[in-house]
Amino acid sequence: MAENGKKSVCVTGAGGYVASWLIKLLLSNGYTVHGTVRNPGDEKNGHLWKLENAAEKLKLVKADLFDFDSILAAVNGCDGVFHVASPSTTSGPNPEVDIVEPAVKGTLNVLKACSEAKTQRVVLVSSFVAVVINPSFPKDKVLDEACWSDKEFCRNTNNWYCFSKIAAEAEAWAYAETNGLNLVSVCPGIILGPMLQHTPNASTFILLDLFKGGDEAMENNLRVIVDVRDVAEAMKLVYERSNAQGRYICTSHMIKNEDLVQDLKEIYPDYNYPKSFKQGRGVPQVSSEKLQGLGWKYRTLKQTLVDSVENCKQIGLL
Ligand SMILES: NC(=O)c1ccc[n+]([C@@H]2O[C@H](COP(=O)([O-])OP(=O)(O)OC[C@H]3O[C@@H](n4cnc5c(N)ncnc54)[C@H](OP(=O)(O)O)[C@@H]3O)[C@@H](O)[C@H]2O)c1
């Protein structure tokens, strides 16, 4: 896809954690990038201009997910679109308006704009939470791309972020099938790794929470982790490979909080870690075999942890 033609792509939510790494990768591979941001002049997008080739090949376009015309202007002239923008908050006074609507309406606006602009391929960032949350899945089943989370279960348990990701991806597939749009989705686990942006994103706090110490026992939740740089590689890979199709689970390591803390203690013994753990949430096994079949490779967990911690130290979060 676009390997032989002009290489111009749009990335929505350009200033965010994942989008920034994706843009860095695309720029360093010769792509021209239209990055959508809500406010191009905002200081929080300043890091994008420091990326290699940004001066020549990056254009920041003002666009809001609710404003169809602004999205159309951003995707016009692009061969491909990476739809990354979506609210990453998990709660709030009005989650259906603040979380679900931008995710679902925003995704449909992007896809409609892509149809109108005759975009060759759209890569949607979904999440492994759109795959694994379903009480009817047998506990010992290794989940693959055919598995879908139960949207109504998430609604009934007020799990609005997960609801928003399931609904947005499901609506995207329905739209793409009806309208003949070339769509591929990537479903990453919890994304860790260094930040390019200055404001810490939601998933970085999952790591920072392990350094809080305190007397209270921490829930020994099972974590499904993938490095942000490996997610960017996965998105570029599914965009470029003409044989890529459907959904791609994108996860690398499954580990419980207690073991994660043990790994961190061995490298960074002087921090204040939780003293004890209590029963936490489990997650079914998921497989990234399909993505690996395209040639996707991932970093070691140790590399991700060290690079994350060093980055947090450098910017004063640890
Ligand atoms: N981080 C993870 O662990 C993880 C795991 C699986 C999937 N994902 C998915 O990966 C994508 C990126 O997440 P991230 O971790 O990079 O989060 P992030 O840093 O918070 O980035 C989210 C981006 O979405 C933009 N956005 C939100 N609402 C918008 C709206 N109404 N109009 C325009 N832009 C809007 C934000 O723009 P502003 O800066 O203007 O708010 C921001 O650039 C999301 O789709 C997320 O669901 C993340």
Image: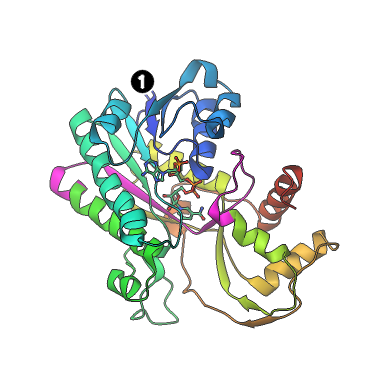
Residue visible at 58% across and 27% down?
A: 51
**Membership of 221 in magenta stretch:** no
| Residue 7 occupies quadrant | top left
Number of numbered discs on residues = 1
Determine the residue located farthest toward the left in the rendered image. 178
Q: Is residue 65 left or right of residue 52?
A: left
| Residue for point 32% across, 67% down | 148
Label 1 sits on residue: 6
Most distant residue in the top direction = 56
**Mark 1 vs ligand 1: CB under 8 Å?**
no
The color scheme shown is rainbow
Residue 283: x, y in percent? 49, 74
Residue closest to the eye, 85 or 254: 85
Q: Residue at x 46, y 64 (%)?
A: 287
Residue 296's place in the image compared with 45, above or below, is below
Task: Locate the N terminus by quadrant.
Answer: top left
| Residue 236 image position (x, y, % from top left) | 45, 38
Q: Is residue 277 above or below residue 310?
A: below
Percent position of residue 29, x then y: 51, 27
Residue 32 location, x and y as percent? 43, 22
Q: Which three-letter amino acid code belongs to the residue tagged 1?
A: Lys
User: Which segment is the magenta one?
Assistant: 176-203
Q: Secondary structure at mark 1?
A: loop
